[in-house]
């Protein structure tokens, strides 16, 4: 009897050891070749975030990779990052970006995307071979544990489609958030400062959440080549998207100051932008950079004619409306101030009003205006500088820090002017940086660049 029990017990031990040995064998077999493993990281009903991790279990280095899979009808992919995407019907193909194609033995890379609909990928192939060479386990799939957690989740992956909730900007889960980022300089002058290399630095070293794509209309901008500038903006939206950044499409009207002067151009431009990018969750539309010399009524009339063009195509996206007197909410001139806006607001949801300031010039007057207005209307600071309103002259970091503290406490999103190597003090890079193509670290930064980079690198509260 005792012996019998002992035998049973030993048999039990043997069974466990055998199972462990088999598991080890399975793992060893699975590890012999590169694999691609899919995890649905989160699912919010109408959509989800998916990630593939490619692990090189083989003994030779992969120099490129390509993952193909099917999605069922009704399920599609919008935003994606850390890969390039192609699509043939419901068959999707992701290939490496130039910076993550090499996977040494034992290493892994991850790319991700946001899906809508409820289906899952199937028929996965990695470089033409099944993504999982061995039969998938019959037990429940591994839960998304620390090993599958995102190495470098992006701002868009974390927040999804933004909306305006009360006076705040909210993410997909209804949490009020603050975005921080940089504006390009005018694309007609400094497109060479916003490249794949510089945007990698902005996304991965600076920790930016948002890129403002600043397309002037006059001064050699859009009006001189509508097709060329529209294509350039498409390209920048894709570049921001590939890095999981939000993209503000800035209709950078400045001179003349009446936005109605460019009304039909704006309608043409935004129709195409919204058509092309309607399935992305990361595009914000800034329809008038800095109205000036006009009343709030003129700006509102313009907004009333541009917003429907966007909404017809991209119903949910956040729209940003410039305000009188160079987007000062009217404080610096005769535009009528915040009261003119609250008395006659734009009748559209997911809409925010734009405020710009240059700390060394605008000081307490603008600070107090911003502090008061933020409790009354949704505000997005799409442009500010730590220097004078010329974008030049000495920095006032003390005053700038007060503004930043205010914006942090009220979760007002901000974008700093500007990500270029223009000679003025407000351009973050020293002259010649963009031609050199070496944007990393703090070496190429002017004082304003180093200061703003430090403030962007602190953790986001998403
Ligand atoms: C300035 C640029 C400068 C350029 C000028 C052209 O720094 O190189 O020659 O525009 O108009 C704004 C504007 C922004 C200005 C910036 C600094 O939105 O276009 O950039 N500024 O003057 N509003 C307040 C300041």
Image (cartoon, rainbow, N blue to C red):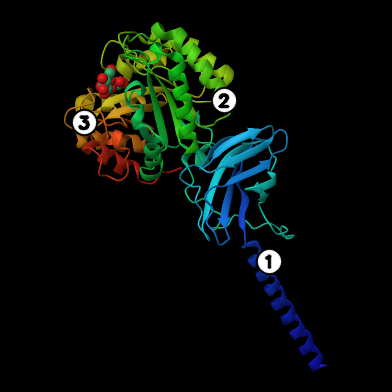
- The quadrant where residue 236 appears: top left
- Name of the residue lying farthest toward the left: 394
The mark closer to the camera, 3 or 1, is 1
Q: Determine which of the numbered discs, if any, sits on residue 26 in the image.
A: 1
- The quadrant where residue 12 appears: bottom right
Q: Kindly indicate whether the residue at mark 1 contacts the one at mark 3 (C-beta within 8 angstroms).
A: no
User: Which residue lies under the disc numbered 2?
Assistant: 278
| First-in-chain label (2 vs 3) | 2
SS state under label 1: helix
Q: Is residue 164 above or below residue 294?
A: below
Q: What is the crowding at mark 3: few (fewer than 14 residues within 10 Å), some, or many (at least 20)?
A: many
Q: CA distance from mark 1 to mark 2?
A: 44 Å
SS state under label 2: loop
Q: Position of residue 226 (x, y in %)?
A: 44, 14
Asked whether mark 1 lies closer than 8 Å to ligand 1, one says no
User: Which residue lies under the disc numbered 3?
Assistant: 425
Q: What is the crowding at mark 1: few (fewer than 14 residues within 10 Å), some, or many (at least 20)?
A: some
Q: Position of residue 96 (x, y in %)?
A: 53, 43
Q: CA distance from mark 2 to mark 3?
A: 37 Å
| First-in-chain label (1 vs 2) | 1
Residue drawn where x is 64% and y is 67% of the image: 28
Report if residue 441 is visible in the image. Answer: yes
**Left or right of residue 69: residue 294:** left
Q: Is residue 145 above or below residue 342?
A: below
């Amino acid at each position: 009897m005792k012996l019998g029990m002992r035998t049973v017990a030993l048999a039990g031990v043997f069974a466990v050891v055998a199972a462990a040995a088999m598991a080890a064998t399975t793992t060893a077999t699975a590890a012999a070749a590169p694999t691609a493993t899919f995890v649905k990281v989160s699912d919010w009903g109408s959509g989800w975030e998916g990630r593939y991790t490619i692990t090189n279990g083989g003994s030779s280095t992969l120099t490129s990779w390509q993952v193909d899979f099917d999605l069922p009808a009704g399920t599609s992919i919008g935003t994606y990052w850390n890969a390039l995407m192609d699509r043939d019907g419901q068959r999707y193909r992701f290939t490496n970006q130039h910076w993550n194609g090499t996977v040494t033995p034992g290493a892994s890379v991850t790319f991700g995307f946001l899906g809508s609909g409820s289906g899952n990928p199937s028929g996965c192939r990695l470089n033409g071979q099944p993504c999982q060479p061995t039969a998938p386990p019959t037990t429940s799939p591994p839960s998304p544990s620390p090993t599958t957690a995102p190495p470098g989740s992006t701002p868009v992956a974390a927040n999804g489609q933004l909306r305006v909730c009360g006076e705040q900007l909210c993410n997909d889960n209804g949490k009020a958030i603050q975005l921080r980022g940089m504006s390009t300089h005018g694309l007609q002058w400094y497109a060479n400062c916003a490249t794949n290399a510089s945007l990698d630095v902005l996304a991965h070293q600076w920790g930016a959440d948002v890129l403002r794509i600043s397309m002037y209309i006059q001064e050699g901008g859009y009006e001189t080549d509508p097709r060329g500038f529209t294509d350039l903006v498409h390209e920048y939206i894709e570049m921001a998207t590939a890095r999981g950044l939000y993209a503000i499409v800035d209709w950078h009207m400045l001179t003349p100051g009446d936005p109605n002067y460019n009304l039909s151009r704006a309608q043409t431009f935004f129709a195409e932008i919204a058509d092309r990018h309607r399935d992305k969750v990361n595009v914000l539309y800034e329809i008038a950079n800095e109205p000036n010399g006009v009343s709030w009524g003129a700006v509102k009339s313009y907004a009333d004619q541009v917003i429907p063009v966007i909404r017809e195509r991209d119903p949910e996206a956040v729209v940003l409306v410039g305000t009188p007197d160079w987007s000062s909410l009217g404080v610096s001139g005769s535009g009528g101030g915040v009261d003119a806006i609250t008395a006659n607001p734009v009748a559209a949801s997911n809409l925010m009003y734009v405020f710009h300031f240059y700390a060394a010039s605008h000081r307490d007057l603008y600070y107090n205006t911003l502090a008061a207005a933020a409790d009354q209307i949704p505000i997005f600071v799409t442009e500010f500088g730590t220097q004078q309103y010329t974008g030049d002259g000495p920095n006032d970091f003390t005053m700038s820090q007060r503004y930043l503290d205010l914006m942090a406490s009220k979760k007002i999103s901000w974008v700093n002017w500007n990500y270029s190597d223009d000679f003025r003090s407000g351009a973050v890079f020293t002259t010649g940086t963009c031609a050199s193509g070496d944007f990393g670290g703090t070496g190429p930064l002017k004082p304003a660049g180093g200061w703003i980079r430090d403030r962007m690198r602190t953790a986001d509260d998403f």
